[in-house]
Structures are given as C-alpha cells and as structure tokens.
Image (cartoon, rainbow, N blue to C red):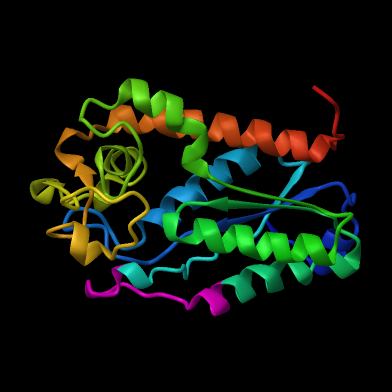
Amino acid sequence: MKLAEMTWQEVDALPREVVFVLPTGSLEQHGPHLPLFTDSILATSVAEAVEAQLQDKVVLLPTLWLGASAHHLDFAGSLSASFETYMGAVSDCIESLIPHGFARFYILNGHGGNSEPNGMALRTLKARYPNLTFAHSNYYTFAERTSADLLTGPAKTIQHACEAEASLIMHLRPDLVRADKLRDDGLRADPPIVGLVSHFDEITEQGSLGYATLATPEKGRVIFEAAVDGVAKNIGSIHAGHVFVGA
C-alpha cells in the first residue's frame, strides 16, 4: 500500500499493526557519472520492491528526498536540509500518524549523511512514545555480505558513486549513467586519522569515492535483490511484533 495513493478513509480503516515505511534519500552530487538523485532512486526502488512483497503489512510513505547533505554543498546542484530541518521533517511525518493509533514505524535510508539524524530523531520519538516501535536502517546494510563477496575492487563496501552504487544505477536506471565518465576516485588522510569528519571536496577529486569503473549491471542486480530480501524480512519481523528474551 502506498500512502500517497490512498484516501483518508482507506488509511483510517487499516489494521493498526501495519508498518509505516519512510524512505530517506538525498539530492546531492554523485561524481561526474551518476545523477544527483542517486540515493533517493535507490532507497525508493528498494522500498517499492519491499512494498510489492508485503502489501498487506506495509504502508509506504513518499520518499523524503531532501537529506542532510551539507558535506556535498561545494559541488554544484547539491541541496541540503539543516540537521534541525531534516530531523524535524522525519519526526513530523511520523507524529502525524501517531494520533490515529498507528504504532510501528521504519525508516529505510539510502544516504549516509542521514544515518545519524535518523537515529537521533527516532530516539527522541521513543522517549516521547515509549510504547511504540521505531526502527531504522540503511538499505545497503542488508547487502553488506553480498557486496563483500561480489565487488572486485579494493573497497568491499558501498561508499559513494562507487562500484556498488554505480552497479545499482546501471541495473535500475541505466539511462542515467554517464558511462563515458565512470572513474575511480578517493583521497585519504596522511597520517591516517580514525573518526575524521571531512567534506567530500576534501576526500575526493571529482566527488565520487570508490571504484566505479568496475561497476556492472549484474552486480547491481545481485546487490539489489539482497537488499530487498533483507529489508523485507526485517519489516516482516516488525509487523509480527517482538519481545525481548534472555540469551
């Protein structure tokens, strides 16, 4: 079920154990080879595939596409919400539904810069509504093992406009890939510093981070299917309800 396509009466008639899923993405630079909307395209695509599998258990909200992307603003075309604005939008979406008796909420994220704000927003909501269920994850969390086995470049995780993200867009929206501009990019601090906070103009030459020249549509298909499978199982567990048990 997609919230944007429903009437208010249809929403009001839903069983209260449905899980409301809010995809979060961004509109920010992804190097010279991928579109600005990459993160939103990927989060939305995974969310829609999951909704198709779990139609009676999930209500899919429209993607919150304006992300926390200040670290990309030195590249033309990138848009960013402040942390306060972004977290407020996340919270307001969820709090609009709570008075109607809905109690299970899941944020499916596609942009690394949203991860910490999503967690902070949900922790604040959990303190306010301790009896409700809130959860969040990145879609690519569920494809990490698959990516580690599949990616052929030195980087074995999803980074930014990298081998994995370029492969995913090649699979889902090949028309948006500038194949003649695929490139490998990334700079590192010398000496190495654990936990260093950086903007992308500091750690890349043209905005991407990883080995996009190694991307293929087939890698994208396998990563996408792993992500969809993992997210669907996770949301299914939320819908089923949970208890805490001892080891």
Magenta stretch: includes residue 93: no
Q: Please tell me whether residue 31 is drawn above or below residue 58 in the rendered image.
A: below
Q: Quadrant of residue 217?
A: top left
The residue located at (27%, 44%) in the rendering is: 174
- Given the current orientation, which residue lies at the most extreme left position? 180
Which percent across, then down, holds residue 74?
23, 74
In the image, which residues are magenta?
Answer: 72-86
User: Residue 201 vs residue 54: left or right?
Assistant: left
The residue located at (19%, 53%) in the rendering is: 189
Q: Please tell me whether residue 29 is drawn above or below residue 239 in the rendered image.
A: below
The residue located at (25%, 38%) in the rendering is: 163
Q: Does residue 63 appear anywhere in the picture?
A: no
Which percent across, then down, holds residue 236?
73, 34
User: Does the magenta stretch mainly form a helix, a strand or a loop?
Assistant: loop
Q: Quadrant of residue 153?
A: top left
Q: Does residue 151 appear anywhere in the picture?
A: yes
Locate the C terminus and report the quarter of the image it occupies.
top right
How many numbered marks are there? 0
Q: Please tell me whether residue 59 is drawn above or below residue 222 in the rendered image.
A: below
Q: Quadrant of residue 12?
A: bottom right
User: Residue 131 vs residue 77: left or right?
Assistant: right
The residue located at (37%, 42%) in the rendering is: 172
Magenta stretch: includes residue 81: yes
- Towards the viewer: 27 or 243: 243
- Given the current orientation, which residue lies at the most extreme front position? 191
Which percent across, then down, holds residue 224?
44, 34
User: Residue 183 vs residue 36: left or right?
Assistant: left
